[in-house]
Amino acid sequence: MRVVLQTWTSAQVRAAEQPLLAAGVPLMERAAFALHVHTAAALRELRGGVAGARVVVLVGPGNNGGDALYAGALLARRGVAVHAVLTATRAHEAGLAALLRAGGRAVQLAEPVDEVAALAAGADVVLDGVLGIGADGSGLRGVSGALVDAIVARGRPYVVAVDLPSGLGVDDGRRDGVVLDADLTVTFGAAKPCLLLPPGARAAGRVVLVDLGLDPAGAPEVVRLDPSDVAALWPVPAPDAHKYTRGVLGVVAGSRAYQGAAVLTTGAAVRAGVGMVRYLGDAGDAVVAAHPEVVVGHGRVQAWVFGPGVSPDDAGQRRRIEYAFEHVLERGEAAVVDAGALELLPPHVGPHAVLTPHAGELARVLTLRGEQVDRAGVEAEPLRWARRAHELTGATVLLKGPVTVVAGAHGAVYAQADAPAWLSTAGAGDVLAGLLGALLAGRVDDVHDDPSLAAALAATAALVHGRAAHRANPDGPISARAVADALPGTIAEVLAG
């Protein structure tokens, strides 16, 4: 079992399976054995033992159904009462035969579904083996969809998804129809993007990866950074460092009406360890009062943050943002483009500019460029629209949400799920912007050498931001200021491993 940090597309997985299948490697038997082991462990946790448990297996026509049937046979041999519900007119013949030989039972699903739904709802565990990596994200249809709706209406039992929850868009995480949410997903050989990408990732529950010896070709489709990755990405100062080598960050944020945004953004950058922060705006007195390290006024910078707490109709801040954009375009200075600055975005920037919108703001950026999409559309297909925004603007895109999606140069995609739900609070985005700005300022030369690095740094910022929220008040309410205050300790912790 491995932690899921990288995923590959369905095409990459199929291609990786072919040489092993041609060589006679029993992939299905290995997958089924692991599935039965994890299901048995769930049964022990749920009811204290395996023998005497009740398991219902939802069986589709493909290999996932075969995996589930063989796993059901192994469970039946351990004293589990196993019922297989055949959701299609055909099922994996050898797997079904193995289940029946082991004492399991099978029933063909048909309308009405009430009796079968009651059987499943009363089980200790349901194995979801209806659909596999051929699913397009449109959900379970027909009688299978009706069955899942009926099961959920009766009170969903503990669900183990076989490879992935049936009906999700395998490569993009789409969830457009009926899906049986899982408590545990046992995925085989290589994890699939839907297990990390929103909105589908929420259906997967806890995910375990069973190693089958696959070696997918090409780069992973989606990556999730782990705290162990941070040390290689963080701009740790050398012994001879000084404030200019560590990076100078220019910040255009806040206004007289929204001084807090300026205070939070600059404070996060200071706490993240940037060499110097220069503030441009009308909240300079409040910023310096809170953070005397900050310098107010123009001067040399290596990277920018602009937009937090700024209204596009604020003439003074608009001029300062336009000035900063000139530096981004002409001098290659990196930038975090947030909130009020998004609507001032030039037609095209490079990946050294990182946009940090939420779904509604990204919809606005796309609409201004001729795309027909609203907030709900972005939330339904966040990877698609983050990539589209990257294509249209050239920028790296960090799309904020319960799972943060980052799309950048050379196809780089990250999906970070490090933050508690408590982090959805006013000012949290300002802290993220300042934190990311500090990272870009410290590694701006490296970003120019490797444009995809901006995406990795954006994902790093999301990871540290989320962990700082946990540190600020584990399992409880937090404020944006508390998250900023927790940054130094969090950064030290992840750098120490």
Image: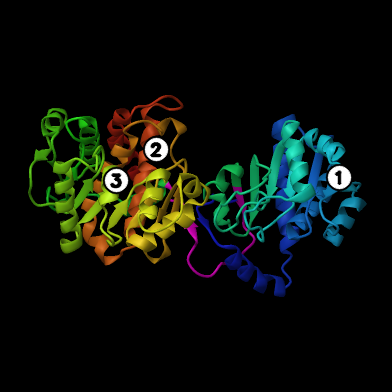
Instruction: Count every numbered label the image shows and give the total.
Output: 3
Say which amino acid is labelled 1. Glu
Q: In the rendered image, which quarter contains the C terminus?
A: top left
- Residue 147 x/y as whole percent: 78, 42
Label 1 environment density (alpha carbons within 10 Å; few <14, some 14–19, many ≥20): few
Nearer to me, 369 or 226: 369
- Residue 274 x/y as whole percent: 20, 45
Work out how far the residue at label 3 is from the one at label 1, CA to CA, in angstroms.
Answer: 52 Å
The reply to whether the magenta stretch includes residue 279 is: no
Say which amino acid is labelled 3. Asp
Q: Can you identify the residue that label 2 sits on?
A: 467
Label whose residue precedes the other's in the sequence (3 or 1)? 1
163 displayed left or right of 201? right
176 above or below 16?
above
Q: Do the residues labelled 1 and 2 touch (CB within 8 Å)?
A: no
Q: Mark 2: which secondary structure?
A: helix
Label 3 environment density (alpha carbons within 10 Å; few <14, some 14–19, many ≥20): many
Say which amino acid is labelled 2. Arg
Label whose residue precedes the other's in the sequence (3 or 2)? 3
At a point 34% along the width and 47% down the height, the residue shown is 356
Identify the magenta region: 208-226
At a point 21% along the width and 61% down the height, the residue shown is 445
Q: Mark 3: which secondary structure?
A: loop
| Whether residue 23 is visible | no
- Residue 137 x/y as whole percent: 62, 54
Q: Can you identify the residue that label 3 sits on?
A: 338
Q: Mark 1: which secondary structure?
A: loop
Tell me where residue 317 sits by quadrant.
top left
Work out how far the residue at label 3 is from the one at label 2, CA to CA, in angstroms.
Answer: 21 Å
